[in-house]
Structures are given as C-alpha cells and as structure tokens.
Image (tube, rainbow, N blue to C red):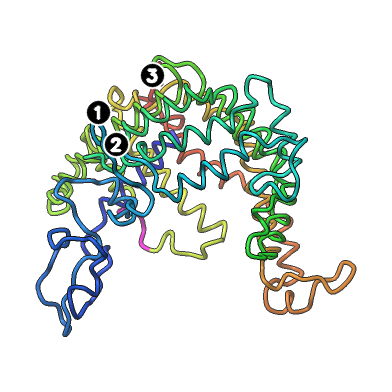
Amino acid sequence: MKFLSIALLLCLVGVGRSESDYDIVAVEDESAATPSGATEEEYRYYGAVESDNDARYTRAPTTEPKPIRQILDVDRWDVEDVVDEEENEDGVYHVFDDEIVEAMQEDVIPELCYLTSDNITIYNSYLLDRHCLEEFESVSPSCRGFKCDVAHYFLEHGAGIMMRVLDASSIKEGIEMIHREVSEVFEKLDMCTCGREFLKAAFKCAPFYSGNALFTDDNEDLVIAYGRVMRNVDVKSAAKVFDRLMTGLCAESSSGLCVDSIFNGLEELADMIMNTVDDYEDYDDGDRKYQKSQEKRCDAVFASTRAWYGRKEGSVDGEPYSEETWEELLNVTSAVTGAFYCEKKCKKSRGVMYPCCLRRMLDDDKMFDNVVRVVESVFKILPAMNYNFEWSGFYEMDSSFYRHEYSREDLAEIMAWTVSDRLRDAFMRTIHPAKYCEGKQLLRCSK
C-alpha cells in the first residue's frame, strides 16, 4: 500500500502541473540555449514574451510521448552522456559509454569479484575495506559471489534497462518495464536469499566502514560526517526494517512473489492516473455537481485529487521540521489515500491494489516499531551535523554552537523527542488506508 500511496501523490503533483512549471530561459540567439547535436525540431518555440528576447522551453520534446523522461526530467543529451546506441544482426541495443565500461571492467569488477579479506590492503582497494569484506565473506557459501554477480549484471543489462524504462510510451508501460526488470533481478540474482544476506552484512559493517572512497580529494569533512551519522543513527533497527521488508516482498502470492502483486496493482493504478489526467480539464472546468460525479468514478482518482486540492489553505505550510506540520501533512495524505481505498462502489477495482501479502507487511507492527526507532535516532543526530558543532572541552560545546544554533534547552527537548501516537497513526492511515475503512467501505485484500 505504501508504494501505491507514493504513486497517488505523484499523480496529484503531475495533475497539478502547468506550463508555468517548466523552466523558461531567455536567449538572444538560437545557439545560446541549443546543446550540441540538437536539431531545430527538438525545440518547442513560443511567441514573443514581455522581454527583448525570445523564450523557449529547456526540455526538448520528442516525436513520441516519453512520460517517464518528463517525470524524471531527463533529456536526450543527459542520456547520451552515459549510454551509447549500437547495432548488430539482432537490431539496435544499448550499452554504457566507454568511460563507464572501462571503470567497471578495470576497477569495480576486479575489486568486487577478486578482492578478499586476505589480499586486501590500503593500496589495492577503493570501494571496500577489510571489515566489510569479512562480513560479506560470512554469508552462506552459495551467496558469496553476490556482489560480483551484481556488478556483472549492472554492466551487461543496466544500459538496456535504463533505456527501456525511459523510452516507455506511457506511465503504465514504464511500470510494466520496471516490473519485468525487477522480477528478472529477483530471480537471476536470488534477491530473496542472497540479496537479504548481503543487505544484512552491509548494514552490519556500515557503521565502521572506512574505505578509501571516503577519502577522495582529501574530503575529511565527509569522513567525519559519515562516521558521526552511522555511529549514532540506529543502523541495527534500519537493518531489521529492510530485512522484514525483503521478507514481505519475497512472500508467495497468486502472481508469484508479493513484489509482483504490488507491481500489478501499480499498473492498474497507472491506468486510473492517466484517465484522471486526460479528463482533468473537464473536471476542473465543470460545476460542483459534475465534479462529484467524476469523484465517484472507479477508473480514475478524482476523489483523491479533490482531497489534496480541497485541503484547508496553508494547512501544510508551517515550520518544515515541526511535528505539527508533519502531522497536518499526513492528515491530508491519509485523506487522499483514504478517498481512493474506501469508496464502497469501487471495492472490486481496488482489490488488486491491496494484495493480502502487502496487507500482512503493513500489519507488521515490529517493522514499524523499528521504523520509529530509526526516525527518532535521525532526528536526534541532526544538530550534530551543523557546521558549528564543536567541542571546547569535557561535556562542553563551543559557545558559538549554543549562541547561534541550539540552546541547551533546545538540545534537551530534541533528545527527549519521540514519535507521538498521533503522528504514527496519521502515517499508518496514509500508507495503509484500507485498514481504516469502516462498514460497507471495508476493503478485502486480494490473494
């Protein structure tokens, strides 16, 4: 459900975008804003604006719709920086550019595939350190080659995966592409066994990681910041969250694995989003009676759109880091997802987006207990990431920190902060709204 909640919010953002949301650049001549290699047809021109210059969109449209590129704000010349197009007897295919291939073949793959805790030194390693290698070598024998398999898989398939997703002709097709690739990754890399073991090992070594990658360009601040964060954030609880999440995604379902059932729901949701986008202008121009009729449609998400845009003005515009602002935001987002899942006339069409395996994941209180611990630990470390965080002696912070950043009272309040029951409830109502549907609105999960 949380994946569907995120998709719904993306829909609301997308529906509300207008031409003014795109960056406009003023140029005195055509060459000033034209990237190398771009043709004139790749630009969208507009009439004169109230200036002495012409205006044009910086994003180059294509002859065919590529909504995933638009959502991710990826242009053709961005892709050409990392991917090359080649052709053989089987047709056109994509590979990473020579620099990436060279780096993978000469640096990354040798380190991930052949470096061990016995032959590693400070001079022959970059990404890994001895402690992490020891943890990776502690996994079951059949999974010890996992990191090497990931590197080879990325090199061989990464460019093709990237282009298939970016070139999808619709949001639904993009989700279908991602679904297919994720299923391939789960199967070929054995994510449900080796992926889980690798993640456990990575989390276990993360607080003590000291690979040479941290010391690039004499960036001592990065080393200090990394150590400070990873030794104070509750990494153990984060590891438990990811382990339980992987367990849930790998649970069996009618579609194969739970991750497949989740993507099937997302594909259905994509159709509803596009129906909403296609008909939104009529909805926005219609009277309230017409809008209400649209909000009852089961093949669109107008009710959720109304819940977002109909919120009280300024209801989520408070202090960005205050608990009150987060609670108000989550109350709005829970209304958005609740409007989608709790419409009694749409229970049949909503069931596919509420697979039983996902319901079990969202009912896992232990997983969310660990989420709470991670959030609380992150909140408490934030003051220590400030530039003025320095010590002047035993148990005494530098006076500039107290004077300009946080008072002693502020720090005491931050260290005593916990996630309130109200905040957690609002969060759960956002990501698991079907649980809170009542009476005839009650939604049953699909197997």
Q: Quadrant of the C terminus?
A: top left
Residue under circle 1?
90
Query: Which of the labelled discs sits on residue 446, or is there none?
Result: 3
Residue 102 in the image: x percent, y percent?
A: 48, 46
**What secondary structure is the magenta-colored segment mainly?**
loop
Tell me, yes or no, whether the two marked residues, 1 and 3, touch with CB atoms within 8 Å: no
Q: Residue furthest left?
A: 47
What is the quadrant of residue 51 in the picture? bottom left
Q: Amino acid at mark 1?
A: Asp
Instruction: Kindly report the distance in space between the C-alpha atoms of the residues bearing marks 2 and 3.
Output: 38 Å
- Residue behind mark 2: 93
* Residue at the (60%, 25%) spot, across then down: 194
Outermost residue to the bottom: 52
Front in this rendered view, residue 209 or 316: 209
Quadrant of the image occupied by residue 371: top right
**Mark 3 closeness class: few <14, some 14–19, many ≥20 residues within 10 Å:** some
Residue type at mark 2 is Tyr
Span shown in magenta: 309-313
Q: CA distance from mark 1 to mark 2?
A: 9 Å
Question: Is residue 311 inside the magenta stretch?
Answer: yes
Question: Quick one: label 2, few (<14), some, or many (20+) residues within 10 Å?
Answer: few
Give the SS element for disc 3.
Answer: loop
Asked whether 75 falls inside the magenta stretch, the response is no
> Residue 111 got which mark?
none
